Image (cartoon, rainbow, N blue to C red):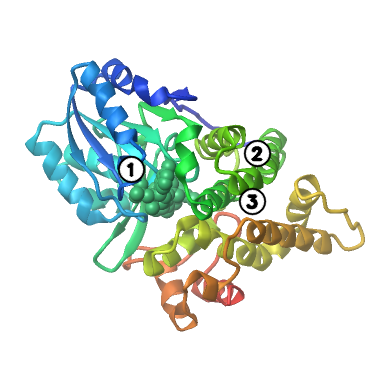
Amino acid sequence: MENFTFYSPTYFAFGKEQECNCGKLVKRFGGSKVLIHFGGGSVVRSGLLDRVKKSLDEEGISYIELGGVKPNPRSGLVYEGIDLCRKNDVDFVLAVGGGSVIDSSKAIAAGTVYDGDFWDFYEGKPVTKALPVATVLTISAAGSEGSPDSVITKEEGMLKRGASGEAYRPKFSILNPALTKTLPAYQTACGITDIMAHLYERYLTNTKDVEVTDRMIEALLLTMIKEGPIAVADSDDYESRANIMWAGMVAHNNCCGVGRSQDWTSHTIEHELSALYDCAHGAGLAVTMPAVFKYNVDHDVMRFAKVAVRVWGCQMDYDNPKATALAGIDALSKFLSSIGMPKNFEELGAKEEDIEKLAYTCCYGDGSGSGVIGGFVPLKQKDVEEIYKLML
Ligand code: NZQ
Ligand code: ZN
């Protein structure tokens, strides 16, 4: 195991009606003038926004509102939010929504207290300072409620890029699984896929002897395989949603990723798809992951065979471990398909003729990329093109 530090100071309030404590928590974490940031309207329709505002009113906390965050959040609204925060002396940003709303909130929080262009952080500058951010989560997926990360798409060139820094860890996150009941089954499945991807990105490591985190990841994957289909089939099943919600946080606050190298190839390759075609991140990952894993399987057949046996219940074929490894990848594909995820480029709305461009942007970005991606197997543009071809 490699040396590591782990500091994840987010306060979690988990369970039914926890959003009613929002005002008290904002006060506890020092907010007095709040920007409430939200998406395209689901929190208005469900009445959640009103409950959050009532809770702030009860504590005498003033606020302004900015809605309209789109899935795969854009830089334009971030600039608007930064302006709004500066003009109104906002000292706390409260995200009410999913990963897109949370990521947009984080970008606004950093941009408000930074003299330059907030996009600098999305070109590699570490985020060291930001207004405090907190979340009321409405979808189990991205894990942004406990992560130090944010992903934003710059409209100019449709570049989707991530930024990271401890200042991005939410001060508190309210996790009420009942809030996810209004999600369409497709979005629930996209979230499940994203959570599983966060686990695989960490499982695919070149670090030896990391049994404790291997076992944690396997337990979380088994949980998703058991609870995922229940949540997709029955939106009212609170317990499956509760298990998935906590799994989504644990999968991505990095307690399962410490002390080991990580991959992130599937995410890097997927981000180009959701940037260009505006598909849901989870749907893009459902198509991307099996292709990446098949391409990389020979790098460490036994690692793929291990997850196949321990998680997917495949029989170990000692004469042909690669067959076991491939059976595990196949089981993952079948599972994702069974919960309604797309299988290929066509079902995702992606186009074969874009492959060269996708692979170029993936490896080189706007000219700032190194040309090599992947923490598990280093991949160049030609490799990435081959992986996209496996998705056809
Ligand atoms: O905008 P509204 O109307 O709220 O609708 C949203 C949106 O259309 C809807 N929704 C959310 N909660 C709902 C609901 N509809 C009904 N009832 C509810 N309770 O769901 C749609 C998707 O929402 P979004 O926030 O985009 O989903 P998600 O949480 O999957 O976030 C995706 C974004 O997170 C990024 C992705 O790349 C993508 O941009 N990621 C962020 C990460 C991070 N910050 O750590 C890591 C991830 O790997 C990921 O890359
Ligand atoms: Zn993800």
Q: Which residue is farthest bottom?
A: 353
* Of residues 208 and 323, the one drawn nearer to the viewer in this rendering: 323
Instruction: Determine the residue positioned at 27% across, 44% down.
Output: 107
16 in relation to 302, above or below: above
Q: Which residue is farthest left?
A: 87
Q: Residue 297 at x, y = what percent?
A: 70, 63
Disc number for residue 204:
3
Image depth: mark 1 or mark 2 in front: 1
Does the closest atom of ligand 1 sit within 8 Å of the Cβ of label 1?
yes
Say which amino acid is labelled 3: Leu
Q: Which residue is mark 1?
A: 45
Quadrant placement of the C terminus: bottom right
Q: Residue 178 at x, y = what percent?
A: 49, 33
Quadrant placement of the N terminus: top right
Mark 1 residue crowding within 10 angstroms, few (<14) / some (14–19) / many (20+)? few
**92 relative to 216 in the view: left or right:** left
Q: Which residue is mark 2?
A: 220
Image depth: mark 3 or mark 1 in front: 1
**237 relative to 351 in the view: left or right:** right
Determine whether label 3 and label 2 are within 8 Å by CB: no
For label 2, the SS is helix
**359 relative to 201 in the view: left or right:** left
Sooner in the amino-acid sequence: mark 3 or mark 2: 3
Q: Residue 8 appears in which quarter of the rendering? A: top left
